[in-house]
Image (cartoon, grey):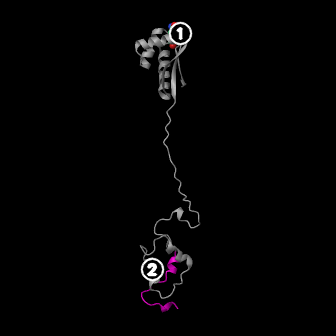
């Protein structure tokens, strides 16, 4: 009979458990109800009639559970360790090409090469002659945005001076 207990006896925990006290909490540490429950186990003169599933949660280890704690015989840890390697790719480069024509004055082309491509007069003259003879030459290699800007600057400058000079870009 329940009334036959001796010593300090806590209230029967079953109703509180069934109200949903978290099985994950650490027994007797913070939860006043569970502290009482411990006292109940110690003081009882008979095996407490506590259903097996309720007792099981007192067997839980005090450290956080890991997948490797599984009792199904499968000791594989489910954690996945991945090595990440930072991969940076260089942005593509673009060649800026100057094309020959029969009308643009040589000095004008030299001026363009000095002004927009930072060449000395000697360099600019040499490159201009290469374009004149070969029909086309690379006058610089840049990132997409810079190449695009150079082409626009040359085309705009030539147009404003009414020369048919052509400048293009292509991926290296
Ligand atoms: N062929 C031009 C001339 O004889 C000169 C020229 C050089 C024009 C280079 C364009 O990209 C060019 N006047």
**How crowded is the residue under tag 2: few (<14 C-alpha within 10 Å), some, or many (20+)?**
some
**Residue 139 place in picture, x, y as percent:** 48, 18
**Residue segment shown in magenta:** 1-19
| Residue nearest the viewer, comparing 167 with 133 | 133
Residue depicted at x 47% and y 17%: 157
Q: Position of residue 162 (x, y in %)?
A: 50, 12
The residue beneath circle 1 is 133
Query: Quick one: SS at disc 2?
Result: helix
Which residue is found at the position 51% from the left and 77% from the top?
17
Report the number of discs: 2
Confirm whether residue 130 shows in the render.
yes
Residue 16 part of the magenta-drawn span:
yes
Residue in the picture at 55% in, 12% down: 135
Q: Secondary structure at mark 1?
A: helix
Residue picked out by circle 2: 38
95 or 47: nearer the eye?
47
Picture residue at 53% right of the left edge, 9% below the top? 133
Residue 13: x and y, percent? 49, 80
> Closer to the N terminus: mark 1 or mark 2?
2
* In magenta stretch: residue 118: no
Looking at this rendering, what residue extends furthest in the left direction?
Answer: 120
């Amino acid at each position: 009979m329940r009334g036959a207990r001796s010593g300090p006896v806590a209230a029967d925990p079953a109703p509180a458990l069934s109200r949903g006290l978290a099985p994950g909490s650490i027994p007797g540490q913070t939860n006043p109800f569970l502290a009482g429950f411990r006292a109940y186990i110690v003081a009882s003169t008979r095996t407490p009639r506590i259903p097996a599933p309720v007792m099981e949660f007192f067997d839980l280890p005090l450290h956080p559970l890991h997948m490797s704690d599984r009792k199904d015989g499968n000791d594989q840890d489910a954690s996945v360790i991945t090595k990440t390697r930072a991969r940076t790719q260089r942005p593509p480069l673009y060649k800026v090409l100057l094309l020959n024509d029969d009308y643009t004055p040589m000095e004008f082309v030299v001026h363009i090469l000095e002004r927009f491509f930072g060449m000395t007069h000697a360099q600019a003259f040499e490159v201009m002659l290469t374009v004149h003879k070969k029909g086309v030459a690379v006058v610089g290699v840049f990132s997409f945005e810079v190449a695009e800007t150079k082409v626009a600057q040359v085309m705009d400058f030539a147009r404003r001076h009414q020369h048919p000079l052509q400048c293009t870009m292509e991926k290296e």
